Image (cartoon, grey):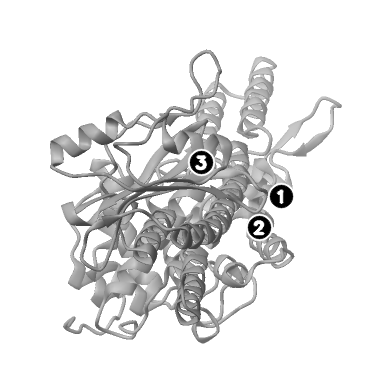
């Protein structure tokens, strides 16, 4: 009979174990804690924790203290033991093993001596004993039930030891303690499994949204995947540096998960952006590329000038000169339609001169050769988007913030809208949508801003440009740092910790990975050169 003090001691230990189990986030560590706690509680030398999956009991953690055996759990060494099936091929229940019987019936089995016990198959145990010079004698096998009274696993302890280290049977008091612990453990395991399943479902829904966005535009496919990866690379580098303004920056696992989710959702607002704007590969493209219409008009001009020549109203040299000029103008507009880094004013003026041509439409009306909308598009100075279209593109971040702020985020994810919604802000307050300054932004949002820019510069799947090389991309990023687009200290970490190179090796073509002068880049970015450490 246990004394009142012993009972209180055991109760205190059970409470402490329950608190510890409820705070553990990692399933592998959790199953390890459960078994070790059970062994310590009743002074067992060995034990195994099984989890029930697909009608089989899987060995999750095995420990035999006297032999120094520890497999599964956080050890990283998976037990090389096949699972135990609960039913035979004909569908009948298999009660031959102790753990199988406990799982199928829900009853605890307390065996004083396995070598004397009848009705159970201990051949595997006896083989283990013979190979390892061990004696598996007393067994306590307890089913683990969750809050819905379902069996989720089995906890088995072997060889209760007395104060002299001799094997003894498990007492009734031992059995009740372990049953109580198994009940707590089952609830803790179920809760963690449910949380993991909910997190997996949540991430799957996020990936579903991103897949829908990427499916709308094959040109941006992968962007929603690569930006979170690069953001986390920069965050990990920032976490490990012991120099500069971020030397005290540290992330917990919760912080990492929060930033990961924000990265996955950073462009969720693009689900509302029109496809023809996202996919605009040339200046005149809408649902189709309107350069074809201009090609047709040139053919009309050439037909008209030919008619004029045949009527004798135009000399042959002038006729030939007109044809040559039209071909040159058409080739020029085709080139301007492609977009690029910069369109100088003289080229814009030539587009306007061509736009002043007149042609006769299908109704016989003389109209401008190029419409006002076509002229605006052809005179875009950088890229392919007009100011109005860029405003439509930029609106995705407003939608992103609106969507994310409307969600009831749990405490550990409350910063997701701020992290995801700040990647188009600038350090000088001239970004969008809220015009935040560096001091008003979290470090995580600033990290995502760098990741978003660098991914866009190096991406090979954009319709309006090829993927740039490392040196070109970092040169542009350095100038943007100097002009206060991005955080200078984070840019320094990005360079010094070679985050750019780790990313390049994973995602860029070999031809894009060229030589980089890091000191020159830091000087270009106006970063103060300092010795790490």
Question: Horizontal and vertical percent for residue 349?
Answer: 56, 54
Residue shown at 56% from the left, 73% from the top: 431
Dot 2 and dot 1 residues touching (CB under 8 Å): yes
Q: CA distance from mark 1 to mark 3?
A: 16 Å
Question: Horizontal and vertical percent for residue 193?
Answer: 54, 51
- Residue matched to label 1: 272
Q: Is residue 182 left or right of 291 when viewed as pictured?
A: left
| Secondary element type, mark 3 | loop
Q: Quadrant of residue 453?
A: bottom left
- Residue matched to label 3: 221
Q: Is residue 267 above or below residue 59?
A: below
Dot 2 and dot 3 residues touching (CB under 8 Å): no
- Residue matched to label 2: 396
Pointer 1: residues within 10 angstroms few (<14), some, or many (20+)? some
Question: Horizontal and vertical percent for residue 329?
Answer: 53, 36
In the rendered image, the quadrant that contains the C terminus is bottom left
Q: Is residue 391 left or right of 223 when viewed as pictured?
A: right
């Amino acid at each position: 009979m246990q004394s009142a003090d012993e009972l209180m001691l055991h109760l205190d230990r059970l409470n402490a174990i329950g608190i510890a189990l409820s705070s553990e986030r990692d399933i592998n560590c959790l199953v390890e804690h459960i078994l070790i706690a059970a062994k310590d509680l009743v002074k067992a030398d060995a034990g195994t924790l099984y989890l029930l999956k697909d009608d089989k009991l899987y060995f999750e953690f095995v420990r035999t203290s006297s032999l120094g055996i520890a497999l599964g759990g956080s050890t990283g060494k998976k037990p090389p033991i096949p699972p135990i099936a609960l039913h035979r091929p004909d569908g009948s229940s298999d009660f031959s093993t102790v753990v199988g019987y406990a799982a199928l019936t829900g009853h605890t089995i307390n065996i004083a001596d396995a070598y004397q016990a009848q009705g159970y198959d201990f051949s595997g145990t006896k083989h283990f004993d013979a190979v390892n010079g061990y004696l598996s004698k007393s067994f306590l096998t307890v089913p683990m039930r969750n809050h819905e009274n379902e069996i989720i696993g089995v906890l088995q302890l072997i060889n209760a030891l007395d104060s002299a280290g001799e094997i003894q049977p498990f007492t009734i008091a031992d059995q009740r303690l372990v049953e109580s612990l198994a009940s707590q453990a089952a609830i803790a395991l179920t809760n963690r499994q449910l949380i993991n399943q909910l997190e997996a479902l949540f991430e799957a829904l996020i990936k579903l949204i991103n897949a829908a966005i990427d499916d709308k535009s094959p040109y941006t496919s992968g962007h929603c995947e690569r930006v979170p990866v690069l953001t986390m690379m920069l965050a990990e580098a920032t976490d490990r540096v012991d120099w500069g303004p971020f030397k005290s920056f540290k992330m917990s696992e919760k912080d990492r998960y929060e930033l990961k989710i924000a990265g996955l959702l950073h462009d969720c607002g693009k689900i509302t952006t029109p496809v023809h704007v996202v996919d605009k590969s040339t200046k005149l493209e809408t649902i189709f590329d309107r350069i074809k219409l201009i090609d047709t008009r040139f053919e009309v001009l050439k037909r008209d000038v030919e008619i004029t020549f045949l009527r004798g109203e135009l000399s042959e040299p002038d006729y030939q000169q007109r044809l040559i000029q039209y071909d040159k103008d058409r080739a020029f507009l085709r080139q301007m339609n492609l977009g690029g880094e910069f369109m100088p004013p003289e080229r814009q003026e030539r587009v306007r001169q061509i736009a002043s041509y007149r042609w006769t439409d299908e109704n016989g009306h003389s109209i401008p050769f190029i419409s006002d909308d076509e002229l605006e598009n052809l005179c875009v100075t950088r890229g392919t988007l007009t100011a109005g279209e860029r405003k439509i593109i930029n609106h995705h971040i407003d939608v992103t913030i609106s969507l994310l702020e409307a969600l009831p985020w749990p405490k550990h994810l409350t910063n997701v809208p701020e992290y995801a919604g700040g990647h188009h802000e600038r350090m000088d307050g001239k970004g969008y949508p809220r015009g935040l300054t560096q001091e008003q932004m979290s470090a995580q949002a600033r990290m995502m801003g760098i990741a978003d820019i660098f991914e866009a510069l190096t991406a090979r799947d954009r319709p309006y440009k090829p993927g740039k090389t490392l040196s070109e991309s970092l040169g542009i990023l350095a100038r943007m740092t100097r002009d206060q687009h991005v955080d200078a200290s984070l840019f320094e970490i990005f360079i010094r910790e070679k985050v750019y190179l780790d990313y390049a090796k994973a995602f860029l073509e070999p031809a894009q990975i060229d030589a980089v002068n890091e000191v020159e880049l830091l000087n270009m970015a106006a970063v103060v050169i300092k010795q790490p450490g």
